[in-house]
Amino acid sequence: MKRFIYIITDRNRNNLHVGLSSDLMKTIKFYSEMPTLFFDSAQQLSRLVYFEEITNEEMAMERFKYVSTFTRSQKEKMIRAVNPDWVDLTIGLKYEQGVRVRSHMRPSYASRVAVTA
């Protein structure tokens, strides 16, 4: 089963939170629905800036434990290696998820021709 290790931050990049999830989109949605659960409203975690997908559950747990011990500068270095502008990666994940859903729902060209003929 797939596991995701992620780093989420607030809009000012003051807090870096490392997490482990089996459903990354559901976890991001949880953070957006409960913005003040972990921090006050000024420091709400809302930007996904880093994630890794790991297929092995044990390896994911080991990697999570390892990344959780990183200092802030080590986490920043890891983020900047793949996301130098600290762009919110949630937008791309939502787009990718939408494309996957639409492609399955879209009827094929052959069925449209058969219907119109």
Image (cartoon, grey):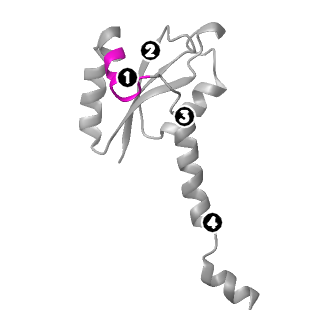
- Residue occupying the point 55% across, 15% down: 10
The local crowd at label 3, few if under 14, some if 14 to 19, many if 20 or more residues have their Cα within 10 Å, is some
The reply to whether discs 3 and 2 touch (Cβ–Cβ < 8 Å) is: no
Q: Earlier in the sequence, mark 4 or mark 3?
A: 3
The local crowd at label 2, few if under 14, some if 14 to 19, many if 20 or more residues have their Cα within 10 Å, is some
Identify the magenta region: 76-84
The reply to whether discs 4 and 2 touch (Cβ–Cβ < 8 Å) is: no
Q: Earlier in the sequence, mark 1 or mark 3?
A: 1
Name the residue carrying label 1.
Answer: 79
Name the residue carrying label 2.
Answer: 16
Tell me the amino acid under the disc marked 4: Met
Q: Secondary structure at mark 2?
A: strand
In magenta segment, residue 40: no
Measure the C-alpha gap from mark 4 to mark 2.
38 Å
The reply to whether discs 2 and 1 touch (Cβ–Cβ < 8 Å) is: yes
Tell me the amino acid under the disc marked 1: Ile
In this view, 23 is above or below 87: below
Q: Earlier in the sequence, mark 1 or mark 4?
A: 1
